[in-house]
Image (tube, helix red, strand yellow):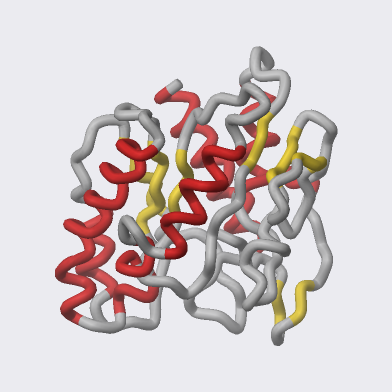
Amino acid sequence: MSGRGGVINGTWNGYIPPECHSQSSILRLSANLTWEEAHEPLHKDIDKSAICGVGPGMAFANSILEKFSRLEVIGLVPCAIGGTSIFQWRRGSNLYDQLVMRSRAALEDGGTIRALLWYQGESDTKKEEDAELYKDRLEKFFISLRTDLSLPMLPIIQVALASSSGTYFNIVREAQLAINLPNVTTVDAKGLQLLNDDPIHLSTPGQVKLGKMMADAFLLSY
């Protein structure tokens, strides 16, 4: 979710596709909790332990504004940390608390949380126990977050994995596709273009396509 599009040999190539362009009506909440004009890499100051490139967020926001003019401003709240398991996002964990804190901070100037975009799971394909527990852990995460944000029907757009190097990839994908909570929509990333030298992460065109797919799913739930 934090974006590896255009990252080659540990360096982002700097290419920003037109679908991911910046504009004054798309804002992001920075790491220091201030609003600024959003730009790629969206997660540069959030997922600081990795090289960030193009992700689905900017393509999502631009697609929303293009198709739904009633929304004058979109605020993106990047929270993703690459390479993490769903267990690391359990209620009470540091990552979970940061997500809740940043979500609440986004409301302080009169904003409204419209949806959660969730793309995670590759790390849970490596161990059979994690894969088998994935569905239960993911559902508990979604329920806890809705409860702690007092948004019991918050729309959630989650992504079914495109690929993974883990042995238990199919178990995690099946768990994602089997989530049956209200207002949870699953977008399937399988078949989207991957990075040439990376069997896990989406390429820039793949990220753009995913962002548009997530936008379409969001608009159907709006």
Q: Is residue 125 left or right of residue 32?
A: left
Q: Is residue 182 left or right of residue 202?
A: left
**Relative to 57, is 48 above or below?**
below
**Relative to 184, is 161 above or below?**
below
* Rendering quarter of residue 58: top right
Quadrant location, the C terminus: top left
Residue at x 49% of width, y 51% of height: 99
Residue at x 58% of width, y 30% of height: 107
What residue occupies the far bottom of the structure in this picture? 9
Question: Where in the figure is residue 85, as x and y percent of width and height?
Answer: 36, 71
| Residue 138 or residue 193, whichever sits in front | 138
Quadrant location, the N terminus: bottom right
Question: Where in the figure is residue 40, as x and y percent of width and height?
Answer: 76, 55
Question: Where in the figure is residue 127, as x and y percent of width and height?
Answer: 24, 83
Q: Is residue 183 left or right of residue 128?
A: right
Question: Where in the figure is residue 149, as x and y percent of width and height?
Answer: 40, 35
| Residue 205 or residue 169, whichever sits in front | 169
* Rendering quarter of residue 146: top left
Residue at x 83% of width, y 66% of height: 14
Residue at x 61% of width, y 78% of height: 196
* Figure label count: 0
* Rendering quarter of residue 51: bottom right
